[in-house]
Amino acid sequence: MSETLLAIGRTRKTHGVKGEVKCAIEDRFWDAFESLRAVFLPIRDVPTPFFVEQIRGSFPEVIVKLEGMDTPEAARILCHKEIFARAKDLPKDLPETETDSGPSYAFLAGYHASDLHSGPLGSIREVQQWPQQEMAVIDIDGREVLVPLHQGFINALDKTQKQVTFDLPEGLLEL
């Protein structure tokens, strides 16, 4: 009997010297992820279970230590893979399924935005759906600036304070 697995996020790259891996978790699975004891990653196309030893960091990217991965070299086989969880380990009342293009960032409308390099940017006026990409609309110095909403550009997200910190490529705000 096979178990139903749901994709809940994606691994990124190794972190530090203890075999930890950066992971991006979809927003709707965030609360459930923190309580999971095991996750599944495809190793040679076979969903392989890994026990979660430790999770640290904050949404959307966290640093995860998985049992048996004690060096960066060992953890390298886990990089850039989809993360799965057993459906029975997830709450039954999860928000609706996200779009095929990835997680929806519509909830960021009204959040205060800043950039690691440029400092405070202002409030996100709205989130627009463009083909293949969601964009934050921010008024900066009297002009409308579009910021791609991509997990790779989001450095930190504080839902209680309604703040998002970006790490944007140089020159993007001048476009």
Image (tube, rainbow, N blue to C red):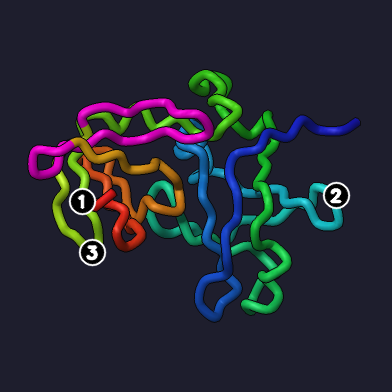
Question: What's the amino acid at mark 3?
Answer: His
Q: Main secondary structure of the magenta part?
A: strand
Q: Residue at x 52, y 23 (%)?
A: 94
Q: Vertically, is 105 above or below 14?
A: above
Question: Which residue is label 2 attached to?
Answer: 46
Question: What's the amino acid at mark 1?
Answer: Ser
Instruction: From the top left corner, tell me how far across and down residue 15 is, in percent.
Output: 52, 71
Residue mark closest to the camera, 3 vs 2: 3
Stretch of the chain drawn in magenta: 125-143
Does residue 153 show up magenta in the picture? no
Please tell me how crowded label 1 is: few (under 14), some (14-19), or many (20+) other residues with Cα within 10 Å: many
Sequence-earlier tag: 3 or 2: 2
Left or right: residue 120 versus residue 37 is left
Does residue 127 show up magenta in the picture? yes
Instruction: From the top left corner, tell me how far across and down residue 56 is, in percent.
Output: 43, 59
Sequence-earlier tag: 1 or 2: 2
Q: Vertically, is 100 above or below 55?
A: above
Q: Residue at x 85, y 50 (%)?
A: 45
Left or right: residue 67 versus residue 117 is right
Q: Residue furthest right?
A: 1
Give me the C-alpha separation between circle 1 and circle 2: 41 Å
Q: Secondary structure at mark 3?
A: loop
Question: Which residue is label 3 attached to?
Answer: 117
Q: Residue at x 65, y 37 (%)?
A: 7
Question: Which residue is label 1 attached to?
Answer: 114
Q: Secondary structure at mark 2?
A: strand
Give me the C-alpha separation between circle 3 and circle 2: 41 Å
